[in-house]
Image (cartoon, helix red, strand yellow):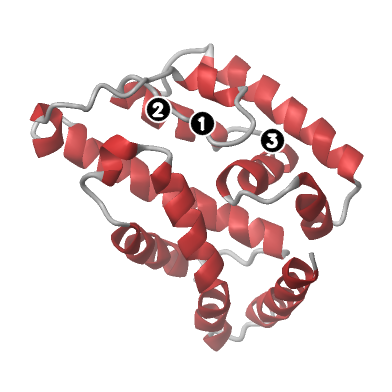
Amino acid sequence: MAEVNGHTAVLGKWLERLRDGDEAARNEVINHACQRLEALARRMLRDYPRLRRWEQTGDVLQNAVLRLHKALAVLRPESPSRFYGLAASQIRRELIDLARHHFGPEGAASHHRTDGAEQVGGAGLVMQKEDPGGEPATLAEWTDFHEKVQRLPVPEREVFDLLWYEGLTQVEAAQVLGVTERTIKNRWRSAKLELQRLLGEGPSE
């Protein structure tokens, strides 16, 4: 808990410098968060073994960091939680692009035999609180799941990112966001219900 709070405090200071116009702070923000970003990329990639056969965490992280660096040139996250939300969105986009590259019609992985591991649809993943333990059955479901996460209201998406992608506990997420644990529980429940509703609408355009 102390480590999470200490990291958050230091990151908050770098973000404040970035908002004040210190462009050098852009690299410092990413450097300071590098370990957390690597863990975030590893966790997001780990849940999808089909894609993990074709990409390594380091490659996903490198490309996502480039996206994040560009995003920080125009965006100024007002808090560490907003920064990690932005980072998660860049990693999501990188994973979606990689999945389309490998599993699209011309991708080598689209012709590669799977190992027969259990697969579940995106809506089924939503209600699993910890590790999904499976993956959406098709590329469309896989990409739709992550794209619909982007459509969650900001408070719910912040909690979803911290609990689902970063693997924080509800107590740690409450500390990061500066809210009560009850608030985290309520937003987590609301996020899962809203994501189920969004997934029920069908694939994103």
For label 1, the residue is 132
- Helix, strand or loop under label 1: loop
- Helix, strand or loop under label 3: loop
Is residue 107 among what the camera can see?
A: no
Q: Considering depth in this image, is 91 or 116 the residue closer to the camera? A: 116
For label 2, the residue is 135
Please identify the quarter of the rendering in which residue 53 is found: top left
Residue 166 lies left or right of residue 188; in this view the side is left
Q: Considering depth in this image, is 99 or 23 the residue closer to the camera? A: 99
Q: CA distance from mark 2 to mark 3?
A: 24 Å
Q: Considering depth in this image, is 185 or 113 the residue closer to the camera? A: 113
Q: Amino acid at mark 1?
A: Pro
**Residue 132: x %, y % from top left:** 51, 31
**66 above or below 139?**
below
Q: Looking at the image, is mark 1 or mark 3 earlier in the sequence?
A: 1
Q: Residue at x 53, y 24 (%)?
A: 125
> Which callout, 2 or 3, points to the residue nearer the camera?
2
Q: Amino acid at mark 2?
A: Glu
Q: Residue at x 17, y 31 (%)?
A: 104
Q: Amino acid at mark 3?
A: Pro
**Residue 106: x %, y % from top left:** 8, 33
Q: Residue at x 32, y 38 (%)?
A: 49
For label 3, the residue is 153
| Quarter of the figure with the C terminus | top left
Residue 8 lies left or right of residue 122; in this view the side is right
